[in-house]
Each structure stands twice: as structure tokens, then as C-alpha cells.
Image (spheres, grey):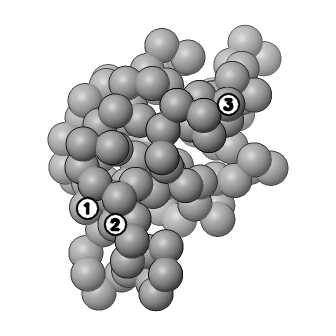
Amino acid sequence: MSLPCRGVEPVPGLRVFELPENLREEGDGVANPWRLAHHSGLVLVAFPSREDALRGAREVADLTDWTRTPEELRTDADFDREEYIDRVEHRTNGLFTARSGKETVL
């Protein structure tokens, strides 16, 4: 899912914003309305609160230069996707969005 990405930028290239109520789906969308997204608008992870999303951004901040394009990140052999997934799954309470799950991380 790609959305116009406003909100705060706690890490260069990563944005945190709250999903508008009319775009929240039942279940996880309602329980996790905060998003961590790439500056391109590609949503990466959903969180229950703003503080959780900001912490999530800090957890993955040092993994790569997030200011690059999604295509540059996808083709970067040095970007450790497994470490990215591990940090999100084990250091945060975030949920990967359908588009950014393990098979399609960036």
C-alpha cells in the first residue's frame, strides 16, 4: 500500500503517520492505526501507537540509507532484509502490512 506520506520523519527517509479513520480496515487496521512508511509512501509496518511507530523507526534506522528509492533498496545486496525482519518482529510490536511482508520487504 502506498499513501501520500505526511507526518513526522524521525529518521531520514522514514515517516510515521496515523492512518485516517476512513482507511482503517476492521481488525488489525483499527488496532494498529499508526504506520511506519518509506518517504516514497510505501507503508512498511503498522503499530498501535505513535510512540511504538517512532520506536520502530529507531530500531531499523541504522540498517540502510532510507533516503534512497525503493528500487535502490530492493537491489542493494548490502541491505540485510533478514535483520530488518528480525528487528521488527523481535524488537517492536509492529505488524508487517500485507504489501511489505517477509516476501516483499521493500
Mark 1 residue element: strand
Q: Nearer the viewer, residue 35 or 64?
A: 35
Q: Is residue 47 left or right of residue 96?
A: left
Question: Which residue occupies 75% across, 47% down?
Answer: 102
Q: Is residue 87 left or right of residue 54?
A: right
Mark 3 highlights which residue?
Answer: 86
Label ID, residue 46: none
Q: Is residue 13 visible?
A: no
Q: Which amino acid, mark 2?
A: Pro
Mark 1 highlights which residue?
Answer: 18
Q: Nearer the viewer, residue 12 or 90?
A: 90
Task: Residue 77: give x, y in percent of width and height.
Answer: 78, 17
Question: Which residue occupies 39% across, 65% down?
Answer: 32
Q: Earlier in the sequence, mark 2 or mark 3?
A: 2
Task: Residue 60: give x, y in percent of width and height.
Answer: 49, 25
Q: Which amino acid, mark 3?
A: Asp
Mark 3 residue element: helix
Residues tagged 2 and 3 counted as in contact (Cβ below 8 A): no
